[in-house]
Image (cartoon, rainbow, N blue to C red):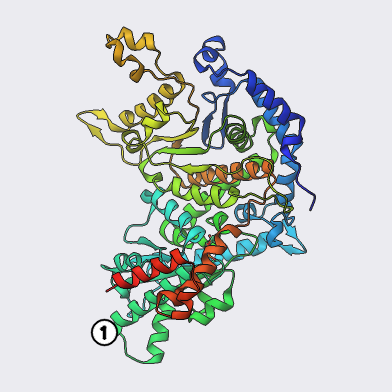
């Protein structure tokens, strides 16, 4: 693996630094002087209409950013990823989530290290689809012979956030009579509240864990198993024998993992386990068998449409020149804001209630990928990396934190995402509510870009003393993404778009966007501390004074 190019030593970086020093952002002036600006900075990506024109960029900015992408070898890195090179160097792995959504029969076949990846991927998908059909048709029954009504996915991080986000996004596509729920947190309330009103006889658990060793997931899976067996035995629907119990586990638990041996140890029939591969990162895994709950809820056909959406973007990113390549341009914009204009965060603001978990999903995707201080060769990064991603659906956010975005001292680039056609076309006294809703989307991006001058405020008759408080500076950058409707394909496109934006930023910064060593220390310490918490005096004595006092206080408070 070659050493990363230090972006700060490139000609383009020097050019961008000089450019920033002379750039006076003026979206009002730029739009007035250039009637073509909106069209020139608007791009089509599959079903997505992506308007970059309200960003703090000129043609020169884009040219320099594209030069930066060339100089840090963005195209070569994408080619390496797509070909299965081990670009996840700290884990010695290929990064092939794009292989998960290649169309059936794609040519030439993707062969990595002599292994036909396409065939492997399709074999698992076929198994997932057959299972999904069985559950959906009622052919798959629980141990009492009843069909399944609720599928509960137990997983955390990438084994939860993708499935739950997509399930919420595609709510209108969920088959009648079937519901999915999701348990992730090791806080026992998550499991207790989720299963509280469920009938174990009609509940199927999918234990989703890439490693099948994650503390939270395995603990919750054991608790779920206990709940199921206790309830069924307790009310006499299951005989209290080892055989009946293991039959119940086999009928009510399936698994998704790369560690199929560990799945069998849990008591899940390996025939009911869906595999994937170590070349799929957890946060890049929703298009793998980790999406099994979705295949059940949505059906194989919709799941295929979902995968096709990803592939549209994968094909675009692989073949489109950099200056028209949407994920590349959006990744470069993020670099522009982070490294040249001093932004620390990035808001994602979906104007679609069904996308309410999209910001949370993106937090893992972007921050677990790019929150790094060393590069892929172990040397320190040479500039700031990963922004804090955050957001809430509009219009709720408008009544909460938009104040800071409009008038605060911080630069917060924001992506606004909306669908032209609502899932629920309701009218209020004859007025289309979706139109009202999206008027807010259009109004917010306009207000952020163009603001309101002191003279405009005065012209409204505002008292002079209050004028400053009512001025909006404008020049607050936004990207607008519009799609026809929140279909499975559009959701796939949105996810793939952000996956590739994330990779582009990682390439510029020279980091391995596919490892996550930063989550390990806390996990290790939790294991070390657990004995102290449950009363081991030696383990308690080994803690630092603050941690020791906290544990002692907890113990004193704990009833
Ligand atoms: O703790 C981080 C992490 O490793 C994520 O990257 C991953 O998505 C999550 O834990 C869950 O891991 P697993 O699927 O192996 O249970």
Quadrant in the picture for residue 428? top left
Which is more toward the observer, 389 or 224? 389
Residue 545's place in the image compared with 299, above or below, is: below
Q: Is residue 39 above or below residue 251?
A: above
For label 1, the SS is: helix
Left or right: 435 as drawn, with respect to 377? left
* Residue named by callout 1: 234
Question: Which residue in the rendered view is the most extreme toward the right?
Answer: 2
| Looking at the image, residue 274 lies above or below residue 490 | below
Q: Quadrant of the C terminus?
A: bottom left
Q: Quadrant of residue 284?
A: bottom right
Extreme residue toward the left, this view: 429
- Nearer to us in this view, 275 or 368: 368
* In the image: residue 213, left or right of residue 462: right
Q: Residue at x 51, y 58 (%)?
A: 158
In the image, residue 40 sits, relative to residue 279, either above or below, namely: above
Label tally:
1
Please state the horizontal and vertical placement of residue 149, each as a whole percent of the image.
Answer: 33, 66
The residue located at (71%, 31%) in the rendering is: 13
């Amino acid at each position: 693996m070659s050493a990363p190019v230090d972006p700060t030593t490139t000609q383009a970086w020097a050019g961008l630094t000089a450019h920033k020093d002379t750039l006076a952002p003026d979206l009002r002036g730029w739009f007035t002087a250039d009637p073509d600006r909106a069209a020139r900075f608007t791009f089509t990506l599959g079903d997505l209409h992506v308007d970059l024109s309200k960003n703090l960029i000129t043609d020169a900015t884009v040219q320099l950013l594209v030069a930066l992408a060339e100089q840090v070898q963005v195209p070569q890195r994408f080619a390496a990823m797509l070909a299965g090179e081990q670009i996840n160097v700290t884990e010695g792995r290929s990064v092939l989530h794009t292989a998960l959504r290649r169309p059936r029969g794609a040519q030439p076949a993707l062969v990595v290290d002599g292994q036909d990846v396409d065939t492997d991927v399709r074999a698992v998908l076929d198994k997932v689809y057959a299972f999904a059909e069985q559950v959906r048709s009622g052919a798959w029954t629980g141990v009492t012979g009843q069909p399944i009504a609720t599928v509960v996915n137990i997983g955390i991080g990438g084994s939860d956030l993708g499935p739950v986000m997509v399930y919420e996004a595609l709510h209108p596509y969920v088959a009648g009579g079937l519901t999915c729920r999701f348990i992730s947190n090791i806080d026992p309330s998550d499991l207790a509240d989720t299963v509280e009103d469920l009938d174990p006889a009609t509940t199927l658990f999918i234990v989703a864990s890439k490693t099948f060793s994650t503390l939270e997931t395995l603990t919750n899976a054991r608790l779920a198993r206990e709940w199921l067996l206790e309830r069924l035995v307790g009310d006499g629907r299951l005989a209290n024998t080892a055989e009946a119990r293991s039959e119940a586990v086999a009928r009510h638990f399936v698994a998704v993992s790369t560690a199929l041996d560990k799945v069998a140890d849990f008591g899940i029939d390996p025939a009911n386990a869906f595999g994937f591969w170590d070349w799929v990162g957890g946060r890049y895994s929703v298009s793998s068998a980790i999406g099994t709950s979705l295949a059940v809820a949505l059906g194989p056909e919709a799941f295929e449409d979902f995968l096709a959406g990803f592939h549209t973007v994968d094909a675009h990113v692989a073949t489109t020149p950099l200056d028209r390549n949407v994920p590349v341009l959006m990744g470069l914009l993020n670099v522009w804001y982070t490294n040249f204009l001093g932004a620390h965060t990035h808001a994602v603001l979906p104007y679609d209630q069904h996308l309410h978990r999209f910001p949370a999903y993106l937090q893992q995707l972007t921050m677990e990928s790019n929150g790094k201080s060393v590069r892929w060769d172990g040397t320190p990064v040479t500039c700031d990396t990963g922004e804090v991603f955050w957001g809430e659906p509009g219009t709720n956010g408008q009544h909460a934190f938009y104040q800071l975005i409009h008038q605060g001292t911080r630069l917060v680039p924001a992506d606004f995402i909306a669908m032209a056609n609502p899932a629920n076309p309701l009218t209020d006294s004859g007025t289309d509510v979706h139109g009202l809703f999206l008027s807010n989307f259009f109004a917010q991006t306009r207000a952020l870009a163009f603001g309101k001058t002191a003279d405009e405020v005065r012209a409204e008759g505002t008292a002079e003393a209050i004028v400053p408080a009512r001025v909006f500076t404008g020049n607050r950058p936004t990207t607008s993404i519009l799609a026809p409707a929140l279909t499975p394909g559009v959701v796939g496109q949105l996810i793939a778009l952000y996956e590739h934006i994330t990779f582009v930023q990682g390439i510029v910064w020279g980091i391995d966007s596919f490892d996550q060593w930063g989550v390990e220390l806390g996990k290790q310490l939790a294991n070390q501390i657990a004995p102290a918490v449950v009363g081991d005096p030696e383990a308690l004595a080994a803690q630092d004074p603050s941690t020791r006092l906290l544990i002692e206080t907890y113990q004193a408070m704990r009833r």
